[in-house]
Amino acid sequence: MCLWTEYALVSSSSALSGRRVLLIIGGGIAAYKSLDLIRRLRERGVSVRAIMTRAAAEFVTPLSVSAVSETQVHQSLFDLTQEAEMGHIQLSRDADLLVVAPATAHMMAQMAHGLASDLATTALLATDKPVLLAPAMNVRMWTHVATQRNLATLIADGVSVVGPGDGNMACGEFGPGRMAEPLEIVAAIEAKLAGTSNNASSKLPLSGKHALVTSGPTHEPIDPVRYLANRSSGKQGHAIAAALAKLGAQTTLVAGPTQMADPAGVDVVHVETAREMLAACEAALPADIAVCAAAVADWRVEHNAEQKMKKDGKSPPSLTLVENPDILKTISRHKSQRPALVIGFAAETENVLAYAQAKRTRKGCDWIVANDVSPDTGIMGGDMNKVHLIFAETHEDWPQLSKGDVADRLVHRIADYFEELV
Ligand code: CTP
């Protein structure tokens, strides 16, 4: 028996209206924010069922959770009444999305290892639905190598993550570990559910649009065995291409050399150099959307050697560099085939907002996704990203998200942009 329809939905105008979330509340001080999260979701017409761990009930009462969600709270794997009404397997599969908030270090470790010791972890292991985590813990626990290893495993398993943010913590320390705010979690839920539909036959938001994405580094040859390159992994650009395709866009990904697998449902053109990347992009036009996420090498060697350069026992060779074509600028200023929406990236190590804003104007694109790629952020090559989305007049500061979630959220904004044009 499915009980989702038994409780009233408040709003029908929200993008989330009619969606079903199974909220798993872990045992941390941030559990108190789960009450506000439920309220925000209910305001948007979301049906919320909640599972609380034993530790969660030490921080917030099941009665409060039951009152705001307007339904029974599930706590035990061995509660015969609850099992008879709705078994734990059905509970884990009846939702559109499972949200773990707060996700403690212990719960993340259990999930990463596939442990199922209570109702919460059993539901997480038994589900066939997407999972979103909002981690919350002490800063040292978050930065601990074991937690980061578990995080990487979970992201590789397809789990999405929102936060944690920086701030003063209940334990008196400062740093990353604070649970994302309820509205940030709502936005992440919206982005996560944007690619899935209540109604399988409904049209996807970017159906009929052609999207062009660049991703990865470029390699600029010095001789047949050596090249100039950078540390870009292609994770962010590939995730954007996958997210565009998921929302229905016919997507062409022009990819520099990376270790990444080609995303499903995307037409991939593999290139090596900046000039090849530009040629492939121009050949892919016209497009409605262009997202230039590649870390294109700014320079190439003026004359690359046809044979391997040999040491001659004298001075090392000097390389004369010349500037590569700017692909983003070429697409943004294209006379006949400029896409309706052109988005660039700005990888900066200082003055991130100011440099990115100037870059937007200089290159002529519509939006810029700016991030701080200083070595201590771990963004270059890592799984997480913290970006600012820059428009002509304003900007948005996004919380720390996995690169997959940055992609989902960006593509959701792209879909909103085209919807507003209609
Ligand atoms: N870009 C491009 N072609 C280039 C260089 C950059 O398409 N030859 C694009 C990138 O894909 C990104 C944006 O331009 O979307 C900004 O890249 P970034 O490396 O941050 O900027 P640069 O152009 O290198 O500018 P600066 O040297 O000032 O950092």
Image: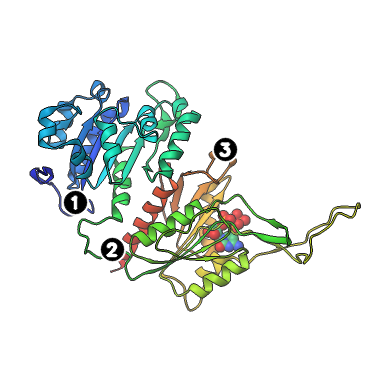
Q: Mark 3 is on which residue type?
A: Asp
- Residue that extends furthest to the bottom in the rendered view of this protein: 336
* Residue 376 - label: 3
In this rendering, position of residue 60 left or right of residue 287: left
Q: At x 36% / y 34%, what residue is drawn? A: 114
Quadrant position of residue 139: top left
Up the image or down, 211 lies above or below 384; here it is below
The yes-or-no answer for disc 2 within 8 Å of ligand 1 is: no
Q: CA distance from mark 2 to mark 3?
A: 39 Å
Q: CA distance from mark 3 to mark 1?
A: 40 Å
Nearer to the camera, 285 or 223: 223
Residue at numbered disc 1: 17
Q: Which one is earlier in the sequence, the residue at label 2 or at label 3? A: 2
The kind of secondary structure element at disc 3 is helix
Nearer to the camera, 103 or 158: 158
Q: At x 8% / y 43%, what residue is drawn? A: 6
Q: CA distance from mark 2 to mark 1?
A: 16 Å
Instruction: From the top left corner, tell me how far across and down residue 252 is, in percent.
Output: 45, 67
Residue at numbered disc 2: 204
- Quadrant of the image for the N terminus? top left
- Quadrant of the image for the C terminus? bottom left
Residue 395 appears anywhere in the view: no
The yes-or-no answer for disc 3 within 8 Å of ligand 1 is: no
Q: Which one is earlier in the sequence, the residue at label 3 or at label 1? A: 1
Q: Quadrant of ligand 1?
A: bottom right
Q: Mark 2 is on which residue type?
A: Leu
Q: Mark 1 is on which residue type?
A: Ser
Instruction: From the top left corner, tell me how far across and down residue 272 is, in percent.
Output: 61, 63
Nearer to the camera, 217 or 338: 217
Instruction: From the top left corner, tell me how far across and down residue 147 is, in percent.
Output: 45, 31
Q: Which one is earlier in the sequence, the residue at label 2 or at label 1? A: 1
